[in-house]
Image (cartoon, grey):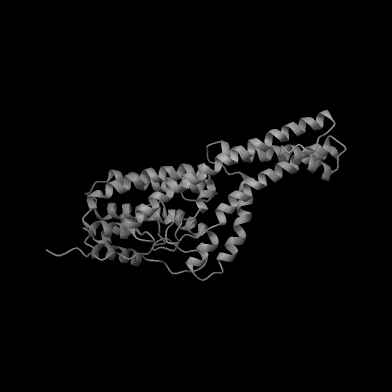
Amino acid sequence: MRVLLGIAGAVIVLGIFSSVLHSLVIPRPTRQGFSRYVQRLVQWPFRLVADRLPSVEARDRVLAPMAPLAVVVTLISWLVAFLIGYALLEASVSRLGLREALIEAGSSLFTLGFASGNRVSLNVIDFCAAATGPIVIGLQVGYLPALYGAYQRRETEVTLLQARAGSPPWGPEILARYAQVDLLDDLSELFRNWERWSAGVSESHTTYPILIHFRSPRVSRNWLIALLAVLDAAALQLAFNPSRRQAEVRMALRAGFVCLRDIADTEGIPYDRDPHPDDVLQLDYEDFLRGVERMRSQGYPMERTPQEAWPHFRGWRVNYEPLVYRLARDIEAVPAPWSGARRTEMAAYAPRTPIDRRPVG
Protein backbone atom coordinates (compact mmCIF):
# COMPACT_ATOMS: atom_id res chain seq x y z
CA MET A 1 0.00 0.00 0.00
CA ARG A 2 2.79 2.43 0.89
CA VAL A 3 4.59 1.58 -2.34
CA LEU A 4 1.48 2.47 -4.31
CA LEU A 5 1.17 5.74 -2.40
CA GLY A 6 4.78 6.57 -3.21
CA ILE A 7 4.34 5.80 -6.90
CA ALA A 8 1.18 7.90 -7.06
CA GLY A 9 2.88 10.77 -5.27
CA ALA A 10 5.93 10.66 -7.56
CA VAL A 11 3.73 10.60 -10.66
CA ILE A 12 1.74 13.62 -9.45
CA VAL A 13 4.82 15.66 -8.49
CA LEU A 14 6.69 14.91 -11.72
CA GLY A 15 3.60 15.46 -13.83
CA ILE A 16 2.89 18.85 -12.29
CA PHE A 17 6.55 19.84 -12.62
CA SER A 18 6.25 19.05 -16.33
CA SER A 19 3.08 21.13 -16.59
CA VAL A 20 4.70 24.10 -14.81
CA LEU A 21 7.85 23.93 -16.95
CA HIS A 22 5.97 23.71 -20.24
CA SER A 23 3.52 26.46 -19.27
CA LEU A 24 5.84 28.96 -17.58
CA VAL A 25 9.44 28.23 -18.54
CA ILE A 26 9.79 26.58 -21.95
CA PRO A 27 9.00 29.24 -24.62
CA ARG A 28 7.37 27.06 -27.26
CA PRO A 29 3.87 25.83 -28.13
CA THR A 30 2.63 22.93 -26.06
CA ARG A 31 -0.62 21.16 -25.33
CA GLN A 32 -0.23 20.43 -21.64
CA GLY A 33 -3.02 18.22 -20.38
CA PHE A 34 -3.33 19.34 -16.74
CA SER A 35 -3.55 23.10 -17.28
CA ARG A 36 -5.85 22.66 -20.29
CA TYR A 37 -8.16 20.40 -18.28
CA VAL A 38 -8.34 22.89 -15.41
CA GLN A 39 -9.00 25.83 -17.74
CA ARG A 40 -11.75 24.00 -19.63
CA LEU A 41 -13.32 22.98 -16.34
CA VAL A 42 -13.43 26.65 -15.31
CA GLN A 43 -14.73 27.79 -18.71
CA TRP A 44 -17.61 25.30 -18.85
CA PRO A 45 -20.03 26.99 -16.37
CA PHE A 46 -19.38 30.43 -17.89
CA ARG A 47 -20.26 29.18 -21.37
CA LEU A 48 -23.27 27.33 -20.05
CA VAL A 49 -24.67 30.59 -18.64
CA ALA A 50 -23.61 32.76 -21.60
CA ASP A 51 -25.34 30.52 -24.15
CA ARG A 52 -28.66 31.19 -22.43
CA LEU A 53 -28.41 34.99 -22.49
CA PRO A 54 -30.23 36.97 -25.20
CA SER A 55 -27.81 39.81 -25.96
CA VAL A 56 -24.18 40.15 -26.99
CA GLU A 57 -23.53 42.62 -24.18
CA ALA A 58 -24.86 40.26 -21.50
CA ARG A 59 -22.77 37.39 -22.82
CA ASP A 60 -19.65 39.50 -22.90
CA ARG A 61 -20.16 40.53 -19.26
CA VAL A 62 -20.44 36.89 -18.22
CA LEU A 63 -17.47 35.69 -20.32
CA ALA A 64 -15.11 38.59 -19.46
CA PRO A 65 -13.81 37.12 -16.14
CA MET A 66 -13.64 33.56 -17.51
CA ALA A 67 -10.04 33.54 -18.81
CA PRO A 68 -8.48 35.54 -15.92
CA LEU A 69 -10.21 33.28 -13.40
CA ALA A 70 -8.96 30.22 -15.31
CA VAL A 71 -5.40 31.54 -14.93
CA VAL A 72 -5.81 32.00 -11.15
CA VAL A 73 -7.41 28.58 -10.69
CA THR A 74 -4.63 26.95 -12.73
CA LEU A 75 -1.94 28.52 -10.53
CA ILE A 76 -3.74 27.41 -7.36
CA SER A 77 -4.31 23.92 -8.79
CA TRP A 78 -0.59 23.44 -9.35
CA LEU A 79 0.12 24.18 -5.69
CA VAL A 80 -2.72 21.94 -4.51
CA ALA A 81 -1.49 19.11 -6.73
CA PHE A 82 2.05 19.51 -5.37
CA LEU A 83 0.63 19.41 -1.85
CA ILE A 84 -1.19 16.14 -2.55
CA GLY A 85 1.78 14.60 -4.34
CA TYR A 86 4.26 15.39 -1.58
CA ALA A 87 1.77 14.25 1.07
CA LEU A 88 1.52 10.86 -0.64
CA LEU A 89 5.32 10.63 -0.77
CA GLU A 90 5.56 11.52 2.91
CA ALA A 91 2.93 8.93 3.83
CA SER A 92 4.76 6.26 1.83
CA VAL A 93 8.08 6.62 3.71
CA SER A 94 6.75 7.17 7.23
CA ARG A 95 4.06 6.02 9.60
CA LEU A 96 2.14 9.26 9.13
CA GLY A 97 -1.52 9.04 8.20
CA LEU A 98 -2.82 10.99 5.24
CA ARG A 99 -3.97 13.89 7.41
CA GLU A 100 -0.61 14.18 9.17
CA ALA A 101 1.19 13.79 5.83
CA LEU A 102 -0.80 16.67 4.35
CA ILE A 103 0.14 18.85 7.33
CA GLU A 104 3.79 17.86 6.98
CA ALA A 105 3.81 18.53 3.21
CA GLY A 106 1.96 21.83 3.57
CA SER A 107 4.35 23.00 6.27
CA SER A 108 7.30 22.36 3.97
CA LEU A 109 5.76 23.40 0.65
CA PHE A 110 4.73 26.82 1.92
CA THR A 111 7.87 27.08 4.15
CA LEU A 112 5.78 27.56 7.29
CA GLY A 113 7.96 25.22 9.34
CA PHE A 114 5.42 24.35 12.04
CA ALA A 115 5.74 20.59 11.42
CA SER A 116 8.89 18.49 11.23
CA GLY A 117 9.64 14.86 10.58
CA ASN A 118 11.99 12.60 12.51
CA ARG A 119 13.23 10.36 9.71
CA VAL A 120 15.95 11.04 7.15
CA SER A 121 13.78 10.02 4.19
CA LEU A 122 10.98 12.26 5.43
CA ASN A 123 13.34 15.20 5.82
CA VAL A 124 14.56 14.75 2.23
CA ILE A 125 11.00 15.04 0.95
CA ASP A 126 10.46 18.05 3.25
CA PHE A 127 13.46 19.80 1.70
CA CYS A 128 12.22 19.05 -1.83
CA ALA A 129 8.78 20.42 -0.99
CA ALA A 130 10.31 23.48 0.67
CA ALA A 131 12.28 24.22 -2.52
CA THR A 132 9.27 23.59 -4.76
CA GLY A 133 6.98 26.13 -3.09
CA PRO A 134 9.09 29.29 -3.57
CA ILE A 135 10.21 28.23 -7.05
CA VAL A 136 6.66 27.69 -8.33
CA ILE A 137 5.33 30.84 -6.68
CA GLY A 138 8.24 32.85 -8.10
CA LEU A 139 7.57 31.51 -11.60
CA GLN A 140 3.91 32.42 -11.21
CA VAL A 141 4.80 35.97 -10.16
CA GLY A 142 6.88 36.36 -13.34
CA TYR A 143 4.22 34.66 -15.49
CA LEU A 144 1.43 37.16 -14.88
CA PRO A 145 3.33 40.28 -16.11
CA ALA A 146 4.41 38.39 -19.24
CA LEU A 147 0.82 37.29 -19.86
CA TYR A 148 -0.69 40.75 -19.46
CA GLY A 149 2.14 42.39 -21.39
CA ALA A 150 1.30 40.20 -24.40
CA TYR A 151 -2.38 41.02 -23.94
CA GLN A 152 -1.73 44.78 -23.91
CA ARG A 153 0.42 44.61 -27.05
CA ARG A 154 -2.35 42.73 -28.82
CA GLU A 155 -5.07 45.13 -27.76
CA THR A 156 -3.17 48.30 -28.72
CA GLU A 157 -3.33 47.51 -32.44
CA VAL A 158 -6.93 46.26 -32.13
CA THR A 159 -7.94 49.58 -30.55
CA LEU A 160 -6.11 51.58 -33.23
CA LEU A 161 -8.05 49.69 -35.89
CA GLN A 162 -11.36 51.01 -34.55
CA ALA A 163 -10.88 54.37 -36.27
CA ARG A 164 -9.95 52.64 -39.51
CA ALA A 165 -12.52 49.86 -39.63
CA GLY A 166 -15.41 50.72 -37.34
CA SER A 167 -16.62 48.75 -34.37
CA PRO A 168 -16.80 45.82 -34.80
CA PRO A 169 -14.21 45.91 -37.60
CA TRP A 170 -15.12 44.77 -41.12
CA GLY A 171 -12.88 44.33 -44.14
CA PRO A 172 -14.91 46.40 -46.65
CA GLU A 173 -15.24 49.15 -44.05
CA ILE A 174 -11.45 49.53 -43.90
CA LEU A 175 -11.23 50.19 -47.65
CA ALA A 176 -14.34 52.39 -47.59
CA ARG A 177 -12.95 54.64 -44.83
CA TYR A 178 -9.52 54.94 -46.41
CA ALA A 179 -11.17 55.86 -49.71
CA GLN A 180 -13.48 58.37 -48.02
CA VAL A 181 -10.55 60.42 -46.66
CA ASP A 182 -8.22 59.87 -49.65
CA LEU A 183 -5.68 57.76 -47.73
CA LEU A 184 -5.55 54.68 -49.95
CA ASP A 185 -1.81 55.16 -50.47
CA ASP A 186 -1.33 54.70 -46.72
CA LEU A 187 -2.85 51.21 -46.66
CA SER A 188 0.63 49.72 -47.02
CA GLU A 189 1.53 50.95 -43.54
CA LEU A 190 -1.58 49.31 -42.09
CA PHE A 191 -0.71 45.98 -43.65
CA ARG A 192 2.93 46.19 -42.50
CA ASN A 193 1.79 46.80 -38.93
CA TRP A 194 -0.59 43.87 -39.02
CA GLU A 195 2.03 41.56 -40.48
CA ARG A 196 4.15 42.27 -37.39
CA TRP A 197 1.06 42.03 -35.13
CA SER A 198 0.25 38.58 -36.55
CA ALA A 199 3.77 37.37 -35.82
CA GLY A 200 3.54 38.62 -32.24
CA VAL A 201 0.14 37.04 -31.64
CA SER A 202 1.30 33.77 -33.18
CA GLU A 203 4.18 33.64 -30.71
CA SER A 204 2.30 34.77 -27.59
CA HIS A 205 -0.98 32.91 -28.14
CA THR A 206 0.71 29.58 -28.79
CA THR A 207 3.05 29.98 -25.83
CA TYR A 208 0.19 31.14 -23.57
CA PRO A 209 -2.97 29.65 -25.14
CA ILE A 210 -5.22 31.11 -22.44
CA LEU A 211 -4.72 34.50 -24.17
CA ILE A 212 -6.98 33.25 -26.96
CA HIS A 213 -9.91 33.56 -24.53
CA PHE A 214 -8.97 36.95 -23.05
CA ARG A 215 -11.61 39.43 -24.21
CA SER A 216 -11.16 43.07 -25.21
CA PRO A 217 -12.25 45.83 -22.80
CA ARG A 218 -15.23 46.68 -25.02
CA VAL A 219 -17.85 44.27 -26.29
CA SER A 220 -17.57 45.48 -29.91
CA ARG A 221 -13.81 44.81 -30.11
CA ASN A 222 -12.17 41.44 -30.54
CA TRP A 223 -8.68 40.43 -31.65
CA LEU A 224 -9.89 37.66 -33.99
CA ILE A 225 -12.52 39.83 -35.70
CA ALA A 226 -9.91 42.58 -36.12
CA LEU A 227 -7.53 40.14 -37.80
CA LEU A 228 -10.35 38.89 -40.04
CA ALA A 229 -11.15 42.46 -41.10
CA VAL A 230 -7.53 43.15 -42.08
CA LEU A 231 -7.27 39.85 -43.98
CA ASP A 232 -10.52 40.57 -45.84
CA ALA A 233 -9.36 44.10 -46.68
CA ALA A 234 -6.11 42.69 -48.06
CA ALA A 235 -7.93 40.03 -50.08
CA LEU A 236 -10.37 42.63 -51.45
CA GLN A 237 -7.57 44.95 -52.54
CA LEU A 238 -5.75 42.13 -54.31
CA ALA A 239 -8.97 40.98 -55.95
CA PHE A 240 -10.14 44.42 -57.18
CA ASN A 241 -6.86 46.26 -57.77
CA PRO A 242 -4.13 43.95 -59.10
CA SER A 243 -2.07 46.92 -60.32
CA ARG A 244 -1.60 48.42 -56.83
CA ARG A 245 1.39 47.59 -54.62
CA GLN A 246 1.08 43.98 -53.53
CA ALA A 247 4.15 43.14 -51.43
CA GLU A 248 2.84 44.42 -48.07
CA VAL A 249 -0.66 43.13 -48.78
CA ARG A 250 0.48 39.62 -49.61
CA MET A 251 2.82 39.48 -46.62
CA ALA A 252 0.03 40.59 -44.27
CA LEU A 253 -2.27 37.92 -45.67
CA ARG A 254 0.36 35.25 -45.37
CA ALA A 255 1.30 36.24 -41.82
CA GLY A 256 -2.37 36.35 -40.84
CA PHE A 257 -3.36 32.87 -41.90
CA VAL A 258 -0.05 31.41 -40.69
CA CYS A 259 -0.89 32.92 -37.28
CA LEU A 260 -4.32 31.28 -37.39
CA ARG A 261 -2.83 27.93 -38.35
CA ASP A 262 -0.31 28.09 -35.50
CA ILE A 263 -3.15 28.75 -33.05
CA ALA A 264 -5.22 25.95 -34.60
CA ASP A 265 -2.32 23.52 -34.14
CA THR A 266 -2.08 24.52 -30.48
CA GLU A 267 -5.83 24.13 -29.98
CA GLY A 268 -6.01 20.84 -31.86
CA ILE A 269 -8.31 22.24 -34.57
CA PRO A 270 -8.10 20.33 -37.89
CA TYR A 271 -7.85 22.25 -41.17
CA ASP A 272 -6.86 21.82 -44.81
CA ARG A 273 -3.20 22.77 -45.16
CA ASP A 274 -3.45 23.22 -48.93
CA PRO A 275 -6.97 24.44 -49.82
CA HIS A 276 -7.91 24.82 -53.48
CA PRO A 277 -8.79 28.35 -54.70
CA ASP A 278 -12.10 27.02 -56.04
CA ASP A 279 -13.21 25.57 -52.69
CA VAL A 280 -16.65 26.71 -51.54
CA LEU A 281 -16.86 29.57 -49.08
CA GLN A 282 -19.42 29.89 -46.32
CA LEU A 283 -19.57 33.59 -47.21
CA ASP A 284 -22.02 33.77 -50.11
CA TYR A 285 -21.86 36.00 -53.17
CA GLU A 286 -24.78 38.20 -52.02
CA ASP A 287 -22.96 39.10 -48.77
CA PHE A 288 -19.86 39.80 -50.83
CA LEU A 289 -21.83 42.22 -53.00
CA ARG A 290 -23.12 44.06 -49.93
CA GLY A 291 -19.54 44.63 -48.83
CA VAL A 292 -18.55 45.78 -52.30
CA GLU A 293 -21.43 48.25 -52.32
CA ARG A 294 -20.16 49.72 -49.04
CA MET A 295 -16.76 50.27 -50.66
CA ARG A 296 -18.23 51.73 -53.83
CA SER A 297 -20.45 54.15 -51.93
CA GLN A 298 -17.35 55.81 -50.46
CA GLY A 299 -15.52 56.07 -53.77
CA TYR A 300 -13.17 53.09 -53.57
CA PRO A 301 -11.66 52.64 -57.07
CA MET A 302 -12.09 49.19 -58.64
CA GLU A 303 -10.22 47.84 -61.67
CA ARG A 304 -12.36 44.70 -61.82
CA THR A 305 -16.08 44.17 -61.62
CA PRO A 306 -17.45 42.25 -58.59
CA GLN A 307 -18.06 39.24 -60.81
CA GLU A 308 -14.44 39.28 -61.99
CA ALA A 309 -13.04 39.89 -58.51
CA TRP A 310 -15.08 37.22 -56.73
CA PRO A 311 -12.93 34.19 -57.81
CA HIS A 312 -9.76 36.00 -56.74
CA PHE A 313 -11.23 37.01 -53.39
CA ARG A 314 -12.50 33.48 -52.82
CA GLY A 315 -9.07 32.06 -53.65
CA TRP A 316 -7.53 34.12 -50.85
CA ARG A 317 -10.31 33.64 -48.28
CA VAL A 318 -10.28 29.84 -48.39
CA ASN A 319 -6.94 30.02 -46.58
CA TYR A 320 -8.37 31.54 -43.41
CA GLU A 321 -12.18 31.48 -43.40
CA PRO A 322 -12.67 27.98 -41.84
CA LEU A 323 -10.21 28.71 -39.03
CA VAL A 324 -11.67 32.13 -38.25
CA TYR A 325 -15.21 30.77 -38.17
CA ARG A 326 -14.25 27.90 -35.86
CA LEU A 327 -12.25 30.11 -33.47
CA ALA A 328 -14.94 32.83 -33.47
CA ARG A 329 -17.48 30.21 -32.43
CA ASP A 330 -15.19 28.78 -29.74
CA ILE A 331 -14.39 32.13 -28.10
CA GLU A 332 -17.85 33.65 -28.74
CA ALA A 333 -16.40 36.65 -30.59
CA VAL A 334 -18.65 39.63 -31.30
CA PRO A 335 -20.90 38.67 -34.27
CA ALA A 336 -19.49 40.96 -36.96
CA PRO A 337 -20.30 40.75 -40.69
CA TRP A 338 -18.49 38.00 -42.60
CA SER A 339 -17.43 36.26 -39.37
CA GLY A 340 -19.66 33.15 -39.41
CA ALA A 341 -22.14 31.73 -36.92
CA ARG A 342 -21.84 31.42 -33.14
CA ARG A 343 -22.93 28.64 -30.80
CA THR A 344 -26.38 30.24 -30.63
CA GLU A 345 -27.95 32.36 -33.37
CA MET A 346 -27.36 36.12 -33.06
CA ALA A 347 -27.66 39.04 -35.48
CA ALA A 348 -24.40 40.50 -36.79
CA TYR A 349 -23.27 43.96 -35.72
CA ALA A 350 -22.43 46.14 -38.72
CA PRO A 351 -20.17 49.20 -38.32
CA ARG A 352 -21.41 52.57 -39.53
CA THR A 353 -19.30 54.62 -41.91
CA PRO A 354 -18.84 58.20 -40.57
CA ILE A 355 -20.53 60.94 -42.59
CA ASP A 356 -18.08 63.05 -44.59
CA ARG A 357 -18.70 66.56 -43.23
CA ARG A 358 -15.84 68.32 -44.92
CA PRO A 359 -16.87 71.70 -46.43
CA VAL A 360 -17.53 71.66 -50.16
CA GLY A 361 -15.40 73.93 -52.37
Q: Give x and y (percent) for residue 179.
A: 23, 58
Q: Is 42 displayed left or right of 172 in the figure? A: right
Q: Is residue 212 visible?
A: yes
Q: Is 229 displayed left or right of 178 in the figure? A: right
Q: Give x and y (percent) for residue 252.
A: 35, 46
Question: Is residue 286 positioned above or below 265 on the image?
Answer: below
Q: Residue furthest left?
A: 361
Q: Give x and y (percent) for residue 301.
A: 21, 58
Q: Is residue 275 visible?
A: no
Q: Give x and y (percent) for residue 320.
A: 41, 52
**Where does the N terminus fall, quadrant-wise?**
top right
**Where does the C terminus fall, quadrant-wise?**
bottom left
Q: Residue furthest right?
A: 95
Question: Which of the two residues, 43 or 133, is positioned nearer the viewer here?
Answer: 133
The residue under the point 45% across, 44% down is 202
Question: Is residue 319 positioned above or below 86 on the image?
Answer: below
Q: How many marks?
A: 0
Question: Which of the two residues, 115 or 274, is positioned nearer the viewer here?
Answer: 115
Q: Residue furthest top?
A: 120
Question: Which of the two residues, 223 or 239, is positioned nearer the viewer here?
Answer: 223
Res 106 → quadrant: top right
The residue under the point 53% across, 37% down is 27
Question: Is residue 70 positioned above or below 86 on the image?
Answer: below
Question: Is residue 276 positioned above or below 23 on the image?
Answer: below
The residue under the point 56% across, 69% down is 52
